[in-house]
Image: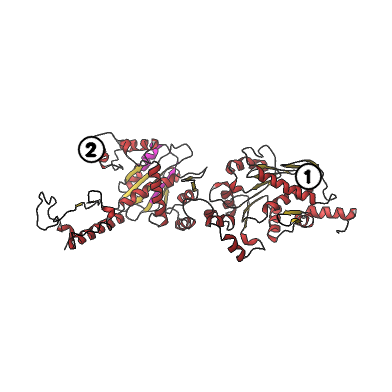
């Protein structure tokens, strides 16, 4: 049985507890264990370090593994603040109502375990979401909502599992001013992919670009966990679950379009451009034009005054590298003039904007500027445009729909993963970090954009079919095919060359169309009814 303290000793204990929250928690608080029931709150060393950081820094942001007792610790810290200090307005933001109510249950469990003589203020209000004390302090827990805490001046704000709080970016915008009178904040969460307000706050905290003190708590900070525990825990977990629940890995924990390995490779390749020019220095150059090289210019066009950006890329078709990139907000007609100037510089690159409302404005402006190297999906439409048979500029550009979008993005992912398309842009990398799967569709996270992604995806798709390396490979394939026919022109293995066959047994090759048939390769033969192509041995060589 604990020794009963006299009045003087009680006063000494109150002062000691008020000065040292760790002492208070370990000496007097009890927690509800799911198996052992009500037990003393014996904090671990990493939890003591967190409490010290809570006292030393106004703003703390915690990236944590699961089941480290941080929510329990935050509840205990809130009780300490409310009991020993006057007029403390403490607000906890939770992902949903049940989580908020559970936080208050922890608070009430702590209060019940405190000796009555230590609980100096009395409780004057008590419900499922709030506890209010006679010293003017209160602890309130609420689920996420647009107006949560906006009208209050807060002493302490705790946001639990912030990475999973819906619209946390808008919520934080409203909550931050409530701390302006000296309030503190504890934001804690397991990771939930890159992008979003929580991720941004934590990354900036690590770079010392904001007021937050970053705290990273991996699975092994818990003294009762070792390698055997980790193996047992992860046995039936997916890679994403392991990254999210235990490894504190932002990139691998989310449903990003690219894998963490691919993002890491792209991150290592990013370098500053050799030149920045144009409107607000948003035209970035990595390589200047090379004589004799064919270039493709693809673009994603926006209105110029909204949340989206207009973007374009200049791609070298010889080595599939991005020479130039633009991302900015200018009107479509000004964007067209800028694209015209840069494309002309790059050997009059073929221009292919996305064919949408603003893309049409760009195409019309390019036509007015007499730029004739514009992409048409149909050769027939290209001829009409070049020779003035029809005013068909609206049929130029790349037509993006659900099917074509899926195709170019699938090709883009494979090209980035295999290093076929070469980009050094940090701006593109930042977009890719927040380009995520939402069900069966991939798109930018709310508050972010994918304009550079779509421009380069179109460019990658077109450059793949126009690159010199691709063309060389096709010519070599055709040459090997024809040589094989010379050796055995009656037994052609269609399985091996199926990509070049159509239903009429015509070899489909963009460079060397050949009509198949017996006796079509006789030397020194002029064109005739039986052999309309005449002597083709010059194609085969000797």
In which quadrant of the rendered image does the C terminus lie?
bottom left
Tell me if label 1 and label 2 are in contact, CB under 8 Å.
Answer: no
Horizontal arrangement in the rendering, residue 144 relative to residue 135 (left or right):
left
Q: What residue does disc 2 label?
A: 387
Q: Which residue range is magenta in the image?
A: 323-339
Cα separation, mark 1 vs mark 2, equals 84 Å
Q: What residue does disc 1 label?
A: 86
Kindly indicate the quadrant of the structure image that contains residue 179: top right
Labels 1 and 2: the sequence-earlier one:
1
Q: Where in the figure is residue 362, as x and y percent of width and height? A: 36, 38
Depth check: give the residue in front, 249 or 366.
249
Q: Residues within 10 Å of mark 1 (few under 14, many from 20)?
A: some
Depth check: give the residue in front, 257 or 472.
257
Labels in figure, total: 2
Q: Where in the figure is residue 226, as x and y percent of width and height? A: 63, 65
In which quadrant of the rendered image does the N terminus lie?
bottom right
Residue 183 appears in the picture as rendered: no
Q: Residues within 10 Å of mark 2 (few under 14, many from 20)?
A: few
Q: Where in the figure is residue 256, as x and y percent of width and height? A: 49, 51
Q: Magenta includes 63? A: no
Tag 1 secondary structure: loop
Q: Magenta includes 337? A: yes
Horizontal arrangement in the rendering, residue 435 relative to residue 90 (left or right):
left
Residue 499 appears in the picture as rendered: yes
Tag 2 secondary structure: helix
């Amino acid at each position: 049985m604990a020794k009963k303290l006299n009045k003087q000793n009680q006063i000494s204990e109150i002062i000691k507890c008020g000065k040292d929250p760790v002492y208070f928690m370990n000496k007097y608080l009890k927690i509800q264990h799911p198996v052992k029931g009500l037990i003393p709150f014996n904090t671990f060393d990493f939890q003591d370090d967190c409490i010290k950081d809570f006292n030393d820094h106004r703003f703390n942001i915690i990236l944590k593994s699961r089941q480290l007792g941080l929510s329990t610790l935050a509840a205990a810290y809130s009780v300490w603040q409310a009991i020993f200090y006057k007029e403390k307005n403490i607000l906890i933001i939770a992902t949903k109502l049940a989580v908020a109510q559970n936080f208050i249950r922890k608070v009430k469990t702590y209060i019940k375990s405190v000796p009555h003589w230590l609980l100096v203020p009395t409780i004057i209000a008590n419900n499922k979401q709030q506890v209010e004390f006679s010293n003017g302090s209160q602890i309130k827990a609420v689920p996420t909502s647009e107006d949560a805490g906006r009208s209050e001046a807060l002493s302490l704000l705790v946001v639990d599992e912030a990475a999973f709080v819906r619209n946390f970016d808008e919520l934080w915008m409203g909550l931050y001013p409530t701390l302006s009178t000296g309030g503190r904040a504890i934001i804690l969460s397991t990771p939930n992919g890159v992008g979003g307000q929580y991720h941004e706050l934590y990354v900036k905290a690590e770079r010392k670009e904001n007021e937050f003190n970053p705290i990273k708590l991996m699975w092994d900070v818990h003294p009762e966990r070792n390698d055997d525990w980790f193996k047992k825990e992860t046995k039936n977990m997916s890679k994403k679950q392991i990254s999210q629940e235990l490894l504190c890995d932002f990139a691998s924990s989310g449903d990003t379009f690219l894998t963490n390995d691919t993002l890491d490779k792209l991150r290592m390749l990013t370098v500053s451009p050799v030149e920045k020019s144009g409107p607000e220095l948003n035209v970035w150059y990595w390589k200047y034009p090379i004589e004799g090289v064919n270039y493709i210019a693809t673009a994603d066009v926006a209105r110029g005054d909204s949340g989206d950006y207009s973007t374009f890329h200049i791609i070298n078709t010889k080595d599939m590298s991005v020479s130039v990139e633009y991302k900015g907000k200018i009107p479509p007609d000004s964007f067209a003039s800028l694209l015209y100037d840069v494309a002309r510089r790059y050997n009059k690159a073929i221009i292919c904007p996305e064919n949408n409302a603003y893309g049409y404005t760009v195409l019309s402006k390019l036509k007015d500027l007499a730029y004739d190297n514009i992409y048409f999906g149909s050769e027939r439409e290209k001829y009409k445009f070049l020779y003035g048979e029809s005013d068909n500029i609206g049929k130029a550009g790349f037509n993006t729909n659900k099917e074509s979008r899926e195709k170019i993005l699938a090709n883009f992912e494979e090209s980035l993963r295999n290093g076929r398309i070469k980009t050094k842009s940090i701006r593109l990398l930042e977009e890719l970090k927040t380009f995520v799967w939402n069900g069966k569709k991939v798109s930018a996270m709310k508050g972010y954009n994918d304009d550079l992604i779509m421009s380069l995806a179109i460019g990658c798709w077109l450059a793949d079919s126009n690159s010199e390396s691709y063309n060389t490979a096709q010519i070599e394939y055709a040459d090997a095919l024809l040589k094989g026919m010379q050796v055995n022109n009656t037994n052609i293995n269609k399985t091996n060359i199926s990509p070049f066959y159509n239903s009429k047994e015509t070899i489909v090759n963009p460079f060397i169309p050949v009509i198949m048939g017996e006796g079509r390769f006789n030397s020194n033969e002029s064109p005739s009814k039986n052999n309309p192509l005449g002597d083709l041995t010059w194609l085969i060589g000797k």
